[in-house]
Image (cartoon, helix red, strand yellow):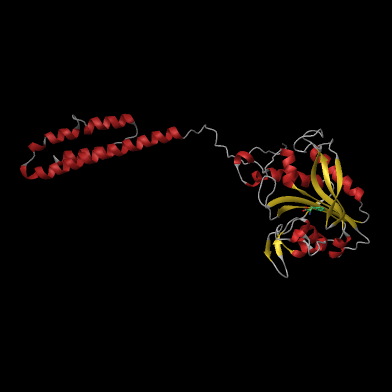
Amino acid sequence: MKEKIYEIEKEIENTVLNNAKQLEEFRIKYLGSKGKIKDLFSFLKEAPKEEKREIGQLMNMLRKSAQSKFDDSTEKLNFAQETEHKIDLSRPADQNEIGARHPLSLVRSEIIEIFNRIGFTVSEGPEIEDDWHNFSALNFPPEHPARDMQDTFFIEKGENEIALRTHTSSVQVRVMENDKPPIRTISPGRVYRNEAISARAHCFFHQVEGLYIDKNVSFADLKQTLLYFAKELFGEKAKIRLRPSYFPFTEPSAEVDVSCTICNSKGCNVCKYTGWLEILGCGMVDPNVLEASNIDSKIYTGFAFGMGVERIAQLKYKVNDLRLYSENDVRFLKQFTAGN
Ligand code: PHE
């Protein structure tokens, strides 16, 4: 009897269960009501008395191991079937969603490219500046209101004031200190001003400022450069006009308007029915500024200009709330693509 049990045990061990058919055959052959194990149990009563207990235990073990072989194989087969369904090798790969470029980054690149084409290099500098580079070297009188707490985020007050730069003119001072003319550079970058945040003002924004210093640089060069810029950016029909203005670091100074591209100068609510949009400030570099950076103002002259990137982006994309640029709302951000 024991031999019979061992024999079946071996048989079970050697059975391969790889598919549903084999499983079913195995179940009928060993576990079913007419199966071999059931059969064995019916012979138990014929076993010699003293062996009954042992044989009974062996039979139980045999039944258990047959059952667990069946259960394990069933589970494995189900799992294999499931994963087979999940893996579809012909399915196209998931697309990596690529974000869009930020509108300010697009506009900044476009401005840089336009000036690159006429020989302007790009220079950058620190956002945390000392008083000298942000104000004093730029001919700001000590009592000038722009130095007030109102406009400037100070980091250290006192002898050597440290602040977040309020414009990227500070970078131009650094260029003038380090390079000899001719200088032809633009400085893009983030600037900070202590203003209440609203649709029309923010505590930080972006600028591109330009500087050109050489012998015989004239106001006519400045006008022509800016006209070229406006046409490149807003189209061949763009016109510019200059209005007298004041900046401590330029003399004479002007504010530049471009003809309204939205209504073709007919008058709309963006240009406030004037037909013109203000886009930048400019002027001839004040001799004091050249001298402060050890450039001989008797030999060299120069012009400078500065514009807000948000302002230009607003005109290009008709975005009328400055806050949208820094809120990182993807619904806003994904609307911008290069060439728009
Ligand atoms: N720095 C000025 C500003 O931040 C812009 C400017 C630059 C004006 C150069 C004139 C010349 O508003």
Q: Quadrant of residue 15?
A: top left
Left or right: 288, with 322 as reference point = right
The residue nearer to you, when weighing 175 against 148, is 148
Tell me what residue is drawn at x 21 percent, y 38 percent: 8
The image shows a total of numbered marks equal to: 0
Q: Quadrant of the N terminus?
A: top left
Front residue (pair 93, 25):
93
Q: Residue at x 72, y 53 (%)?
A: 189
Please identify the quadrant where the C terminus is shown. top right
Q: Quadrant of residue 249?
A: bottom right
Measured as percent of width and height from the top left, residue 283 is found at 86, 52
Q: Position of residue 27 (x, y in %)?
A: 25, 32
Left or right side of 322 for 22? left
- Name which residue lies at 77% across and 65% down: 132
Residue positioned most to the left: 49
Asked whether residue 10 appears in the rendered view, the answer is no
Residue 77 quadrant: top left
Instruction: State the residue in front, 154 or 70.
Output: 154
Residue 129 x %, y %: 72, 62
Give residue 337's position: percent from left, percent from top.
68, 38
Residue 233 shows in the view: yes
